[in-house]
Amino acid sequence: MQMSRIRCSILGAVFLAAILSARPARAADSLLWSTNRNGVTADIQDWNLPKLLGKIRALTGWQVKMEPGTSATITARFSNIPPDEALNRLLGNVNFTKDSSNGVSRLLVYRTAASAATQAIEPSPPEVKDYRIPNELLVLLKRNSTESIDDLAKVLGAKVVSRDDRLKLYRLQFADAAAATAAANQLGGDNSVGMVDSNYTVDRPTPAQSNPLTGAASQTPVLNPKSLANGVVIGLIDTAVQMQDGFSQYSLPPITVVGQPNEPPDQITHGTSMFETLLQGMGSDPGKILPVDVYPSGDSTTTYQVLEGIVAAINSGANIINLSLGGTGDSSALQSLIAQGTQKGVLFVAASGNTPGAALTYPAAYSGVLAVTASDPNGQLASYANDGPFVKAMEPGTSIVSLNGQAWLEEGTSTATAFATAAIAQIINEQHVTVNQAVNQFIQSHPPPKP
């Protein structure tokens, strides 16, 4: 499989406007309490007392009680200190005592006397996964900047772990979260810096189901298109695509921003599944597909690689971006890039996620993104699918694809997203309408599930 490692030669107008509009973001609040290592790390701002105590209760398993009416606002930032010292820093504005009896630890917080601490604090509910990489930052230097990222990293005590000198986009790694936060604050006032943002992990796409079909023979779909469309290019931001016979006539040269792929030859990749699903969905008038690999083999990736992949796809002619990705954090840089791409006429289509409920998932929940959920074979919302208020359309979540003659059943909102992208491309190809017209027509015929 031939792949080319792409580094965009020009910082495209879409990406430039997007990234420079991203403002320095303060890292998300966090309290980490390691019971095994006996160390506490905090980066919190303006928490009220019940919130703090509920978090401590959940993290430690202690019994926690508070005197009714006791109040405080807590802001603290420290890294890997002993629990007793952490309590002193967190609860320095109120009275508290901690004791242990019969193997049960208690924390009592009060205004007047410990005996008045009668209000039991319940543990905070589990939080949504924090995708932020606490000791990393993404930094974009302004195009006219003469400052060296290596000199800047040295001053900050950081290591440059990924770099794109043509984009002037860099991934910096620090000793710990506190150092990264301090650096973000410092860089926010540097006139040579266009953007500072946290870096986030991006889950490897995980279908709700991906299984070989025993006894089922299949082959690469043979399509007989009337003609290949000239205008529609779908940027498939995903894992590597295993190019098979018949794929090349529908594919532009694949791009990778993570080096040469090394996928198992007997396991169909998510990218391959989505490529075939796109072809199935476009029927007899397929557009071109531009595979963009942003996932190191076997690993999750980060928003740094996703940003690079989207920029490479757009600068290579993609006007529809398919994001059948795993979960990401709420990245201001990614959000801003999507917003600016949308303003330039690029359509972004993203999966709502394979966790039932209505939680916000990114990038699907960003404004301007066509968020797609999945239906079951009966046309009802699939049991695994997210149907939050940001969802704008629903498509079937199941497709049958193939790898070297072996049929595979793929199921998930990623599949539904590929079908949605394909349907919109087909409308554009057949009816010669604008992207917005095609999207509106598609949503009317494939509405989201009813509340």
Image (tube, helix red, strand yellow):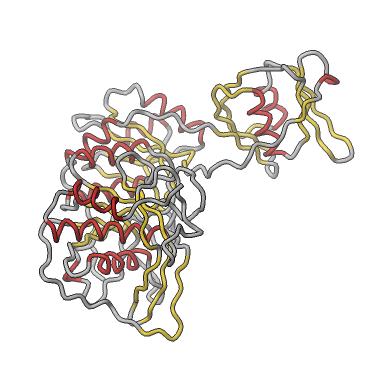
Q: Is residue 138 above or below residue 312?
A: above
- Residue 51, given in percent of the width and then of the height, sits at 63, 28
Q: Is residue 304 above or below residue 76?
A: below
- Residue 30, given in percent of the width and then of the height, sits at 56, 34
Q: Quadrant of residue 215?
A: bottom left
Q: Residue at x 77, y 26 (%)?
A: 119
Pick the residue in front: 328 or 358.
Answer: 358
Pick the residue in front: 130 or 125.
Answer: 125
Q: Quadrant of residue 276?
A: bottom left
Specify the quadrant that holds the N terminus: bottom left
Q: Is residue 118 above or below residue 40?
A: above
Q: Residue at x 67, y 28 (%)?
A: 86
Pick out the residue farthest to the top.
112
Pick the residue in front: 70 or 243.
Answer: 70
- Residue 395, given in percent of the width and then of the height, sits at 36, 59
- Residue 343, given in percent of the width and then of the height, sits at 21, 38
How many marks on residues? 0
Pick the residue in front: 46 or 122.
Answer: 122
Q: Is residue 92 above or below residue 426?
A: above
Q: Is residue 376 left or right of residue 88?
A: left
Q: Is residue 121 left or right of residue 236?
A: right
Q: Residue at x 49, y 45 (%)?
A: 358
Q: Quadrant of residue 375?
A: bottom left
